[in-house]
Image (cartoon, rainbow, N blue to C red):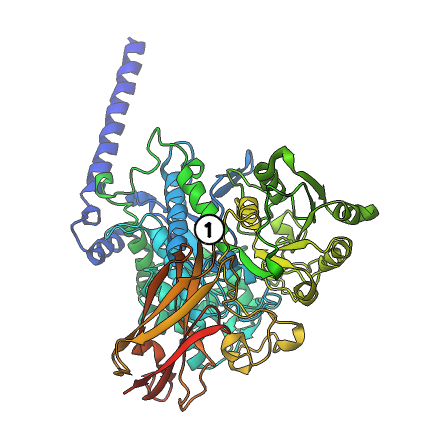
Amino acid sequence: MKIKFQVLRATLMIVIIGFICNYVSFSQEKYPFRNPKLTMEKRVDNIISLMTLEEKVDFLTNFQVPRLNIPSPGSAEGIHQTLIRSFNPGSGNKVVPTTSFCQVYGMGETWDPELIEQAGAVEGYEARYATQSEKYKMAALMLWGPTSDLARDPRWGRNDESYGEDPFLTGTMAASLTKGIQGNDPNYWMAASLLKHLFANSNETTRGRSSSDFDNRLMREYYSVPFRMAFMEGGARSFMAAYNAWNGIPMTVNPVLKDVVGKEWGANWVISSDAGALGLAVTEHKYFNSKEEVVSAAIKIGMNQFLELGGNVKDDINKGLVNNRINEADINSAIRGKFNTIIRLGLLDPAEKNPYSKIGAAGEPEPWNSEKHKGVALQVARESVVLLKNNEKILPLNKESIKSIALIGPFADSVLYDFYSAKTPYSITILQALKAKLGARVNIKFVKNNEYNKAVEAAKSSDYVIVVIGNDPMCGITNIGQAFNQDGSTKVCPECGDGREGRDRSSLDLPGEDLVKEVFAANPKTIVVLTSSFPYAISWSQANVPAILHITHAAQEQGTAVADVIFGDYNPAGRLVQTWPKSMDQLPRMMDYDIRNGRTYMYFKGEPLYPFGYGLSYTRFEYSNLKFNSETMAKNGSVTVTADIKNSGGRDGDEVVQLYVQIPQSKVVRPIKELKGFKRIHLMAGESKSVSFTVKAESLAWWNDKVNGWEMESGPLNILIGSSSQDIKLRKTAMIE
């Protein structure tokens, strides 16, 4: 009898629990915010009305509302790889082996927005797969990327995280990666893009306390442009504020985040601090006396995600409420954007409504192992290769006539990764790629360095020498956590020409160039492969070595791309995204953020080692027949520019056609020239194509603080078409009326 009673009681409890669960589930499904037919605004209104103040405070630091069954989208780094990892004290790190493209700097060197959009789609798909597949179940739908800061100085330690020094190029690429990440569905995102680091974050060593000082006009016309383009053209709605201050006010609390970024550009969904930035506003910037003040001020301007390394942000928020620095209405306003993101990702809607809900379904192979994703990775790597020199057409090499190659250098048999890389499905080194391409027929003599004169001996006894030199993007460390100092900087790099996050470079010299000199003396048929995250002043190599290639780190197909270019299976067409100086003497002081003082190709008046937009090909291109659809342009109009490009060489290849403008009679200081259009086109040998650009008058305006708006000037407009900022092939003048 006792056993029957216990069984009856257990059965009754199961029924009751089941009823409660079903009731709660049924009740939650009946909440208006679950109705996809309602507007986003009404759905968010409903969510906020159902939440307690305690839940709202918790939501600011924890991207979910458990009681309402609202899940967190999760997050992952996503500047050139969807970096999905977790740490469990018991089982250790868990890392998803996702596709790794070359560093952002290299992605910029493709000058191919359509390809970068494909790379973004790879990242977004892999994030959704890892989130939804039963094998991983690692939420990663908020990707922290693209990085949209400008590489105004080659000494910047995070130069590799920028698409370049030009705002139009960088903005175009950032918008493209954003489009790919978020997908093309009109109602849902595949993943969400969070831009970083807004803005003028291009010095590292003192970033936790420094102020990037420049006028409002430069903010509008230069430093903020890539972010605005990624928001307005790419569709991003979220961003991370930079560590630095702008004109003395830390970006974490700078009013520009609300007044311009939020109100004008609509980017006010997820607004995040950078890691530890709240504390740095007190200890380094000394702008506040307590974190309570920082957090309250940040919430006031709309910040709703706090990445803090120590302390308790919730306590700081609650103190702010008690001390009337903020109120519940401020929190309500701040958290709306996070719910917008959750809704746009489809996390509150029936699965059948969301086209991305099927990604990661049972039986679907892991996408990073697919030929499609491998193909995009290879194409990005190939298109990123820049041919810097090719004297007497030493390249491409003929693999049928070569019997031996000396492959020399510390990076010839490794693919190096950076702070924003992790495990990949595979990686192919230059040595591996050469062996695969040449087989046993060619003797490849691999030597890491010239210890015991081994490199010189290998060079002497080989038909050709390939020297692979560059920088270590991690500066010799393997544990990222050990690299950081308390002020947000990182430990000094062993080589003064190296840099990374938290540490700027103090030299443009490349120690590996000494190795080049030694092997070149032994065999003048030397090809240099520079694998680097930033420019080097390789004046000696440029003057002496017959051929030089540049590629960045982190591409899982790095070796294949380099081998394909060296042996002519791919015709290089990458272009530089930054002015490469001959020496440090050509650079203004590091903390001079006024680019009009001789920075970037737009204001630099010296002779660079390599100009912005530069890169060679194995074929030749002819430019002709520059035309306008109209010789005049209204102040609210546009002009269509066309030119004919012919591949007059003997190989198929790509050409990057670049359009620059000059406004010679402006009443304010304008750039020497400024990029306003570019297209990477493929031409077969002997083929011609007509390339067209639309130049809009609004893109030529300058920001006038006196009227707090854009001003368009009348007068001549010079249109320049060429293959780099210095190699101008065609020019013609229109009139703005």
Left or right for 639, reference 296: left
Amino acid found under the numbered disc labelled 1: Val
From this view, report whether residue 734 is shown above or below residue 296: below
Q: Is residue 303 visible?
A: no
From this view, report whether residue 544 is shown above or below residue 712: above
Judging depth in this view, the residue of 579 and 270 nearest the camera is 579
Residue at figure coordinates x 66%, y 72% from the top left: 583
Residue matched to label 1: 380
Image coordinates of residue 155 in percent, x first then y, are: 61, 67
Judging depth in this view, the residue of 116 and 137 nearest the camera is 116
In which quadrant will I find the N terminus?
top left
Q: Quadrant of residue 373?
A: top left
Residue at figure coordinates x 51%, y 82% from the top left: 596
From this view, report whether residue 512 is shown above or below residue 149: above
From this view, report whether residue 132 is shown above or below residue 388: above
> What kind of element bears circle 1?
helix
Residue at figure coordinates x 59%, y 66% from the top left: 156
Q: Residues within 10 Å of mark 1 (few under 14, many from 20)?
A: many
In which quadrant will I find the C terminus?
bottom left
Judging depth in this view, the residue of 250 and 144 nearest the camera is 144
The residue at the far left in this view is 37
